[in-house]
């Protein structure tokens, strides 16, 4: 086990080589054609993973007047739905099926893109056709894992959401808050937050570490996860620090990008265009991918993805 727990593993040390690797890949020399090719791989890799900000929940009191107004609105909505079931049900079915199809397509393409982008970053290459074919089985394994994980997450999260809606409806119908329903809603919200964080960590570890292990070992996602768990089991505190540091990096990078977008209107408009925005922000994506690879390399030469490629960073 000692070889899986190196004497020194730092979240700071990978910063410098990751930044240097961005310079080597994208600026020495600068090649716009190379940017567009690698940018396409990055765009596929992060397809459908763009986050959206969530708004705060409704705030206010359940006074008798507010409760009655809310109850009347619910009753009116229910009557409208019942009167228009003939077109509402087909529309809901079509939207649901379309959403599932898009989710599957995006997950499949992004699973393929993860290995294509990793291939480009690890080898300082601008290739699409070769990694698309070379890592087909790897991507299919990752795709299946992500679909199963997504379905489990959906089931685990949708149940407390339904229960919370039922409790809210009960409070509205009673025209006043009750201690137990309020306590139940708070518990359900906290449960959803904790579960979402857990699934987010699994996704983070999968993309940052399991995918590179699959890349190195030419193995399935299950085998790669088993190998990663042997590392994680004896380095829990280090990976917790990695998660916290990644949050800090995300905040800093987000501030830099938002500042640049606010200062340059043209940059802002172009960055919002799919694919073009990824090409413009390619240094950010290359840094993000490189940082996790340099961090993983600290756990031993057997986890150095750069060692199997032609172009290696110092």
Image (tube, helix red, strand yellow):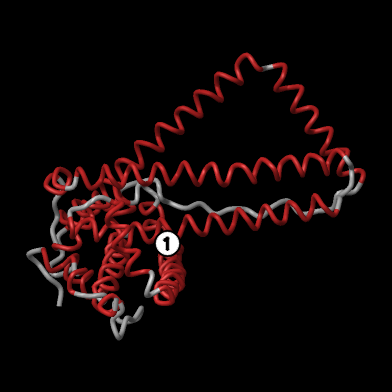
Question: Which residue matches tag 1?
Answer: 261
Which residue occupies 23% across, 77% down?
17
Q: Is residue 96 above or below residue 215?
A: above
Quadrant where the C terminus sits is: bottom left
Residue 204 placement (x, y as % from top left) = 39, 60
Quadrant where the N terminus sits is: bottom left
Q: Residue furthest front?
A: 1
Q: How many marks?
A: 1
Residue 27 placement (x, y as % from top left) = 18, 68
Which residue occupies 86% across, 44% down?
66
Residue 21 located left or right of residue 269: left
Residue 220 placement (x, y as % from top left) = 25, 50
Q: Residue furthest left?
A: 310
Q: Is residue 271 above or below residue 97?
A: below
Give the quadrant of residue 6: bottom left
Q: Is residue 238 above or below residue 56?
A: below
Residue 307 placement (x, y as % from top left) = 12, 68
Which residue occupies 21% across, 68% down?
303
């Amino acid at each position: 086990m000692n070889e899986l727990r190196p004497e020194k593993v730092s979240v700071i040390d990978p910063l410098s080589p990751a930044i240097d690797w961005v310079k080597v890949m994208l600026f020495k020399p600068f090649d716009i054609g190379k940017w567009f090719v690698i940018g396409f791989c990055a765009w596929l890799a992060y397809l459908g993973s763009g986050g959206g900000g969530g708004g705060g929940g409704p705030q206010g009191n359940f006074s008798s007047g507010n409760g009655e107004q809310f109850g009347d609105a619910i009753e009116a909505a229910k009557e409208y739905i019942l009167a228009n079931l003939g077109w509402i049900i087909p529309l809901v079915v079509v939207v649901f099926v379309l959403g599932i199809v898009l989710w599957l397509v995006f997950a499949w393409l992004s699973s393929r893109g993860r290995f294509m982008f990793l291939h480009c970053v690890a080898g300082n290459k601008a290739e699409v056709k070769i990694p698309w074919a070379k890592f087909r089985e790897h991507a299919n394994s990752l795709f299946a894992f992500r679909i199963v994980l997504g379905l489990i997450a959906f089931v685990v999260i949708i149940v407390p959401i339904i229960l919370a809606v039922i409790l809210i409806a009960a409070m509205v119908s009673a025209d006043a808050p009750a201690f137990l329903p309020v306590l139940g809603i708070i518990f359900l919200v906290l449960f959803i937050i904790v579960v979402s964080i857990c699934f987010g960590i699994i996704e983070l570890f999968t993309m940052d570490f399991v995918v590179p292990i699959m890349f190195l070992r030419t193995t399935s996602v299950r085998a790669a996860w088993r190998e990663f768990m042997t590392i994680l089991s004896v380095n829990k505190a280090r990976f917790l620090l990695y998660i916290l540091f990644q949050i800090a990096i995300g905040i800093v990078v987000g501030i830099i990008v938002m500042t640049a977008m606010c200062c340059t209107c043209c940059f802002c408009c172009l960055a919002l265009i799919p694919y073009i925005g990824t090409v413009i922000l390619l240094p950010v994506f290359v840094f993000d991918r490189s940082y996790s690879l340099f961090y993983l390399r600290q756990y031993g030469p057997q986890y150095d993805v750069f060692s199997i490629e032609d172009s290696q960073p110092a």
